[in-house]
Amino acid sequence: MSTVTAVVAQITQSLDGYVTGPDDGPGKGLGEGGERLHYWVFNGPWSYGEAPSGEASGVDKEILDEGVGRTGAMIGGRSTYEAAEAWGGENPWGLAFFILTHRTEDEPSNGAFTFVSGLESALEQARAAAGGKDVGIMGGADTIRQALAGGYLDELVVTIAPVVLGGGKRLFEDFDRSVDLQQVEARQSDWATHLRYRVKK
Amino acid sequence: MSTVTAVVAQITQSLDGYVTGPDDGPGKGLGEGGERLHYWVFNGPWSYGEAPSGEASGVDKEILDEGVGRTGAMIGGRSTYEAAEAWGGENPWGLAFFILTHRTEDEPSNGAFTFVSGLESALEQARAAAGGKDVGIMGGADTIRQALAGGYLDELVVTIAPVVLGGGKRLFEDFDRSVDLQQVEARQSDWATHLRYRVKK
C-alpha cells in the first residue's frame, strides 16, 4: 500500500495551555470550568449536570469528521480511559483502540479495548491495525508528550478554546525539549481555533 | 470624540506558552531558541549575532501596521525596557510611551519615555495621550497579566509561533484566574498564527 501512516495527536487546550481545569478527575470531568474547552464539540455551552444535547457544526464538524475519516487506529492513555469511565465499556471509535497502561491485566474481556504496556508497542500494533490510515493519539497530555519526546509524532492538532482557565493540567507540563513545527492550517469556528502542525524531524 | 479607546495587549508566545526561551535576559535576547518566536517580524530566520535584515510581509505586515495604526499610546514594563536596552535611548514608537517601574527616578531626561509607578496611573495617562486611539500594552508578560487580572484589558492579541520551546517565561505563569474570551479573528502567515480575542467582562 502506498499510503503512509502518520501518527497524529489531537487535543484541546485553553489559551493558557491547560487541557483540564483545576480539580479534574473521575466524576469531576475536566475540572472547574473545564467544560468550556469543549463547547466546540457540542456547538455551545453545556454542563456536567446533564448530557450535552448539541452537536458540532460547521468548521468544528469538519475537523471531527476529517479526523475520524483519516484515522485507522487509536491510542489513548489509561488516565483518559478512566476519566471517560471506559466509555461505558464500549469502544467509542469503532476502530482498534489501544490503551496505554502498566496494568494490562485489567483489560476487559469483551475485546473492546487492547491494553498495552508501552508506547512503542502500542504504536507498532496500531500501525498494523490502521490499514494505511493514520494512527490517532487522543491523549491524555502525558501520552502526547511521550510521543512528541520520542520523535513518534508526525502531526499535532491543537484546538485552542477561547478561555483562560487559570489552573489545571498543562499539555506541555514538564516538557523540556525544543521542537520545531511547520504550520499546516488554522481554522476558526464560533467556539475554537483549530491549529494543525507538522512536526519537523 | 466618539471613538472608544480600547486597551489592547499584544504578545508572541510559543505553542507551549512561553514568551521567552530558557535563559533570557539583558544581552541574551529572548533566551535559547527564543528568536524563533519572532521569525514573523523579520519574514524568516534570524539570529542574535547580527541585526535582522528581513522585514515583515503579507499577513504579518498587516498585523503590525494595523497595530501601529490603531494605537495612540503605549505601555511597557521595566523589564521589557531593560531587555530592549531602552531602544538605544530613543522612543521606538513615536507615541507617548509609558514605562511601568518602581524606580521612576531613573527616567531619562530626554523625554523619550515617561516612567510611571503603577498600572492604573499609566493607563490613565495613556488614555489621555491616546487621542481616542487604542492604548497598547506591549508586555512583558507580567504587565499583561496585571492588566488582565485587573479587568483593564479589552483585547488580547496572542501570536503563536510554530515552535515548542520547552522552557522560558510563560505568558500566563502563576495566573490563577479564569477569564472568558470572545474570538475576533485568526490569521495565519508563513511564520505564525495571530489570534485576536475580546476579553469578556
Image: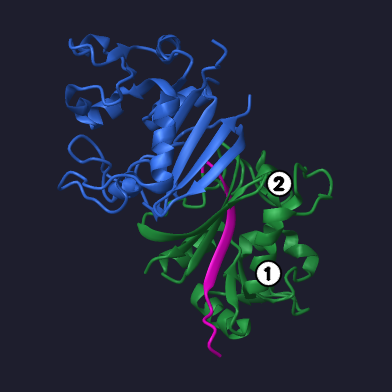
Chain colours: A green, B blue
Q: Is B91 rendered above or below residue B48?
A: above
Left or right of B175 in this view: B122: left
Q: Chain of mark 2?
A: A
Q: Choose between B195 and B58: the one closer to the eye.
A: B58
Q: Choose between B107 and B31: the one closer to the eye.
A: B107
Q: Is residue B15 visible?
A: yes
Residue A70: horizontal and vertical position, in percent?
Answer: 63, 73
Q: Is A170 rendered above or below residue B98?
A: below
Residue type at mark 1 is Val
Residue A48: horizontal and vertical position, in percent?
Answer: 78, 45
What residue sits 67% from the left and 55% below the top?
A59
Residue A3 is covered by the magenta coloring: yes
* Neighbourhood count class around disc 1 (C-alpha, 10 Å): few under 14, some 14–19, many 20 upward: some
What residue sits 74% from the left and 49% below the top?
A27
Q: Choose between B138 and B177: the one closer to the eye.
A: B138
| Occupied quadrant, residue A64 | bottom right
Quadrant into which the C terminus of chain B falls: top right
Mark with earlier residue (2, 1): 2
What residue sits 39% from the left and 54% below the top?
B163
Residue A139: horizontal and vertical position, in percent?
Answer: 58, 61
Label ID, residue A68: 1
Label ID, residue B184: none
Instruction: Label 1, secondary structure: give it.
Output: helix
Residue type at mark 2 is Tyr
The reply to whether label 2 and label 1 mark residues of one chain is yes
Residues rendered magenta in the picture: A1-16
Label ID, residue A39: 2
* Neighbourhood count class around disc 2 (C-alpha, 10 Å): few under 14, some 14–19, many 20 upward: many
Q: Chain of mark 1?
A: A
Quadrant into which the N terminus of chain B falls: top right
Mark 2 and mark 1 residues within 8 Å of each other at the beta carbon: no
